[in-house]
Amino acid sequence: MKNKVIRIPALFCTLFLVSLLFSGCARNNSIAIRYQAEKLLHNAEKVYEEAGIRPDLKNQQQMNKVKAAFNDVANYAWIYLDSISAQKNPEERRDLESIAFMAVNRLSGIYYTERNFDSAIVILHKLMAVTSLEGEPLLISEINLARSLQSKGDWAEAMKVFRSIIDTFYPPVDSDNQIMVQALNLPFELVRVYTVLGDSAGLAAQMQSAKSYYQRLLVEWPNSALARGALSNLSRLYMSEKNWDKAIEYLGQIKDSTGQSDIDAATTIADITSYGKKDFPVAIALYNALISRSKDSITTAAIYAREGKSYFDAQKYGKCREVMGYIRDNYPRYFQNNPIPQNFIALSLAQEGQWNLAENEFHWLIDNYPATEQAFDAFLIIADHYSQSGDAKTAQSWYQQANDFFDQVGRKYAGSDIEASAISYKAEIARRQGNWDAAVKSLLEINDKFPQQEIGQQAILNAAAIYREKLNDPQKAEALIERLKTELLPLGSGKKSGSITDVK
C-alpha cells in the first residue's frame, strides 16, 4: 500500500511534465509557423515593391511573379491554419489569419484589375471560410467579394452581400469604437445606385430601408458620433427626394463641440434654402449669420461666394457683382484660386445685356482659370451667344476653338478629373450640333477611362439615352445599362454634401 501511495504522484508528475512539454512544443510550433508565414509575406511584399507596381501592372511576367509570391503566402496559411488552436494559441492563430488576409487582399485586387473576377471570388470565399476575421479585415473582404460579384455581372448575389454587410456590421464600429465609415454609408450608397439606374421599385425599397437604419442608429446611439453620421445621411436622403424641410430638420440637429449648430450643416441649410426652396432673402440672411461665425478668410470668402450666387439666382445681378467684387478686393487668395466669383461677374453682366463687358470677363476667366469647368462653360456661352444672334460663322469658330482647347487641356491633365470634364464638354458640343455618333464616342471614352467615377457613370447613362432616343438602337442602350450595373459600385467616400468650401 505504501508503495502505491508513492507511485501515484510520480505518475501524475510524469504526465504533467509530458503535458507541459507538448504544450511548449505546440506553442513553439505555432510560433515557428507564424514566423515562416511572416517571412513569406515579407518576401511577397518585396517582390511587389521591386516590380514598382500597383495592381494595374502591364508587364505580365512581373505580374505572374507577384501573384505567385502572394499565392505562396495564402497556400501556406491554408495548410497550417488548422495546426494552430484558436483556444490554446489565440495570438498566433490571429496573426496567421491576419497574414492570410493581407495576402488575399493583394491577390483579389490584382485579380480584380485583371478582370479575373472568378479567381477573386474563389480566394475571398476561401479566406472567409477558413478564418474568423472580424472588424476592418472582414469588412474589406466582404466588400471586395461584393464588388467582384457585381463586376462579374452577378447583380443579385452582389446586392445580397452588400446588404449582409449592413447587418453584420451593426452598429458600424470596430473593436476600438471607431466608426467604420464604409459600413455606415453603405445604406445611403445603395440608394444612390438605384437612383442612378432609374430602378423605381428597387429605389423605393432601399430608401425605406436606409431611413429605418439611420433612424434606428439615432434611437439606439443618441448624442454620439454615430448619431451625427446618421443625421447627415438622413438629410442627404431627404435632399435626394427634394424634401427640403425634412432635410433641414435633420441638419439642424447636428451640433459642434460647443453645442452650436455645426457650421457645415448650417451652410448646407442655407444652400437648401437658396437652391432648393428658392427663398433667397432667408438664404442671404443665413449666409450673413454664418459670416459672423467664420474664423478664417477662406471660409468667409466661400460663404460670400454662396451669398453672391443667391443674389444672382434672385436676379439681383448688380448686387451679385458687388459681392463678388468685394471678394476680389478683400480676399485675393481665394479669388486667385477660385473661378466662381469671376464667373458670376461675367454671367451677371451677360444677364443684364451688357454683352461686350461680359465677353471680356469671360475671356479673362478662360485665360486665368483654364483648367476649370467655368472656363469650359465660358466657351459654350460665347458660342451660344453668337449662334442665337444669328452669327453662325463666329459661333462655329468658337465651337472649334472650344474643341481644340478641351483637347489641349485633356492631354495636359491626362488621367485626372480635368481630362474627364474636358471630354464631357466635347460630347456636349457634339450634342448641340446634332453629331450623335461623335457625342456617343466621347461619352464612352469617359466611361472607358473613368468607369467607377460619377462622371463616367453619368456618361454611360447619357450614351444610352442617345442610342435609345436619337440613334434608334434600344439594344445598345440596354447593353450599356447592363454594363453600368457592373461598374456602379456602392462604395462612395461619403463626403458631406454642402462642404463649406464648395459653391454649387
Image (cartoon, grey):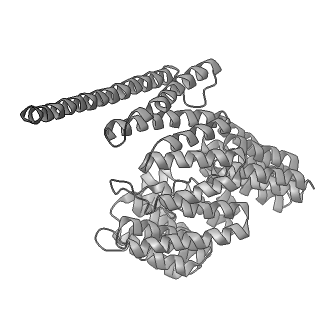
Which residue is at a point 49% across and 70% down the rendered structure image?
214
Q: Residue at x 41, y 24 (%)?
A: 42
Quarter-wise, where is residue 95 in the image? top left
Give left or right: position of 383 versus 312. right
In front of the other: 126 or 146: 126
* Image-based side of 420 in relation to 431, left or right: left
Residue at the farthest left position = 2
- Closer-to-camera residue (1/167): 1
Q: Which quadrant of the rendered structure holds the N terminus?
A: top left
Residue farthest toward the top in the current orientation of the protein: 61
Q: For this view, does 419 lie left or right of residue 474?
A: left
Residue 156: percent from left, percent from top: 69, 56
Q: Residue shown at 48%/19% (left/top)? A: 50
On screen, 122 above or below 260? above
Q: Give the quarter of the image for residue 441.
A: top right
Q: Is residue 188 left or right of residue 17?
A: right
Q: Residue furthest right?
A: 472
Viewer-closest of 29 and 222:
29
Residue 7 in the image: state x and y as whole percent.
13, 31
Q: Is residue 241 above or below residue 194?
A: below
Q: 210 or 159, which lies in front? A: 159
Whether residue 323 is situated above or below residue 483 in the rendered picture:
below
- Residue 442 seen from this side: yes
x and y percent of residue 234 in the render?
A: 51, 71
**Residue 288 at least partly seen:** no
Q: Looking at the picture, how far across and down is residue 152, in whole percent?
A: 70, 44
The quadrant the C terminus occupies is bottom right
Please tell me how many numbered marks the rendered image carries. Answer: 0
